[in-house]
Each structure stands twice: as structure tokens, then as C-alpha cells.
Image (cartoon, grey):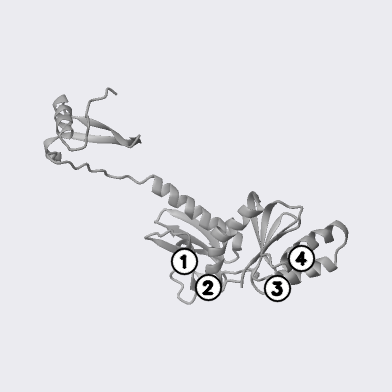
Amino acid sequence: MEEVYTNCYGSLSVYKNKNDALKFYNECYLLSEGAERERYASILFALNNNESIAYDNFSNTCGEIYLHTNNYFERPLKIDLDSMLSFKDCIKYYKDSLKPLLEVCNEFEINFNNNSPFEEFGADNEFNMRSITDFYIELLKKKKMNFDNITTNEVSDGKYELVIDNNFVLDTRAWDDFNSVIDNVNSIEEYSKKKESEKEYTVELAAPGLKKEDFNVNIMRLLIEAKDGVFEGKIKMKVHDVEDIQKMCVTLSKIQNIKSVGRVAD
């Protein structure tokens, strides 16, 4: 069934189907009056016209999300947002960032209405417990993040350390709620981006008649830009003597489609 999204009083509510949303707002409508009833009437009008997105005609932004995606009678999950989002952007954030994580939580049968949702989870050496490591591996796969080494160590009763790449540590607890899981995944994502930005890359240039054994150079920086369909490149290098530069310029200039090669003063 198609999910339904409503914005009422600045909160995005997600329902697993239209019937659940109609049931909830019908009850709200019957138990309210005045301006509050008008809000619910606007939402009911949209839902009864087969709309999957409805709002109260007053709220254009959202500061929190309520997930009514499990049993109708269970307390919805509340997710606090760091900043206000437009109704459209809030739905996108839910679909792109929260829903994939929620799918993993459902696969692992985690009930966040329990006081200790991860009570049955433990460290890697606790064979009678479900694996915190496996849970986070699946979460990170949803975010297209893979790490060679993820482990979980017990700190004390109900407290654990999730260790990534042997140097990035996150605290996890048996009583973590969904917001804690989101924060942990976001922290890992920030670590992943930082790690990627710090990678070093080796660039090798190959050209006919140019052998690295013939030159005593150390390429420090390579910059290539396109201007009007023509590529212009700059190579900054350390050389043993001027002859190496002259020899490289001559050799590069002989390559087909290279228009000119020259030395640029730093």
C-alpha cells in the first residue's frame, strides 16, 4: 500500500496507508472544534480525494517527523530535525535518509517502543546475542558505505563500542532509540567523507617516447581545464636540472594533438 504524508502543526506524519491516516484524522476532527477542526478538515478533504500528500493549510514547514508505520495502536516514532524543512524537503529527507534505515530496523525486528530496543544485541564475542556489528553493517549498506573492519566491544552492561577501521569509535547502548541510530549513522558518514578526502592518489602520465626512467622529476600537482573545447594542462614538478624540463617539453610537443608546450614561471 502507498504511504501517506501529512503536515499538521508543523510536523510531518507518515502513515503506512490511507486508511490509518483517515482513521486518525477522523478521530481528531470529531474531538476538536474551531480553528483546530479546520486543520483536520483540510487534511481529510485531501485524503478523501485520494491524495497521498495532505496538509492543514496553515503549516508550510516541518520541524519534526512522526512515523505511524507500524501497528496503528503503537506510539509513533518521533524524529527531531536539526532545522526546519519545507514540507516537500521533509518528505524527501524521510524517503532518502530515514526510510532505508527503518527498513533495516524492521528486518532485525527492533521495537523502538521498548525501553531497551537493543536488549538482545551484544558484542562480537557474545555468541548468545544478536550482533550489533551485523546491524550497523546492514545500515551502512543502505547508505552505500562499506568498511573493511567493523567490530563491537562490550564496555559494561548494556554499553558497547562500535569500532570502525580500528580508529573511529562510537558509543552504542541497549536503550538507544531511533534518533540515536540516525546520529550514529550520520557520524559514520561524516567520518567516511573525511577519510575519502584525505586519500592520496598517484597519477601516472604516459606518452609515446616518454619514459619515466629518462627523467628525474617529481610531479607535485596536475591541473587540467577545458576552455572552448580545448584542454589546457599545467604540471608543477620538482626537477634535477633545467635539462629535464627542456627534454620533457620537447617530447610532449611531439605528441599528436598537443598544440604547444612551454615553461611557465612559478
* Rendered image: mark on residue 1: none
Q: CA distance from mark 4 to mark 2?
A: 32 Å
Contact check, label 1 and label 2, Cβ < 8 Å: yes
Kind of residue indicated by mark 3: Asn
Q: CA distance from mark 1 to mark 2?
A: 10 Å
In the image, residue 182 sits, relative to residue 131, either above or below, namely above
Callout in the foreground (3, 1): 3
Quadrant of the rendered image containing residue 241: top left
Q: Nearer the viewer, residue 101 or 254?
A: 254
Left or right of 140 in this view: 105 = right
In the image, residue 233 sits, relative to residue 90, either above or below, namely above
Q: Which residue is mark 2?
A: 107
Q: Residue 38 in the image: state x and y as whole percent.
A: 83, 59
Q: Which residue is mark 1?
A: 138
Q: CA distance from mark 3 to mark 4?
A: 11 Å
Q: Earlier in the sequence, mark 1 or mark 4?
A: 4
Callout 2 crowding tier (Cα within 10 Å): few <14, some 14–19, many ≥20: few
Q: Residue 149 in the image: state x and y as whole percent.
A: 38, 61
Q: Residue at x 12, y 39 (%)?
A: 209
Kind of residue indicated by mark 1: Glu
Q: Residue at x 84, y 61 (%)?
A: 37
Q: Residue at x 60, y 65 (%)?
A: 175
Q: Residue 249 in the image: state x and y as whole percent.
A: 18, 30
* Rendered image: mark on residue 19: 3
Q: Residue 49 in the image: state x and y as whole percent.
A: 72, 67
Q: Which residue is mark 4?
A: 44
Q: Nearer the viewer, residue 156 or 170?
A: 170
- Most extreme residue toward the right, as rendered? 34
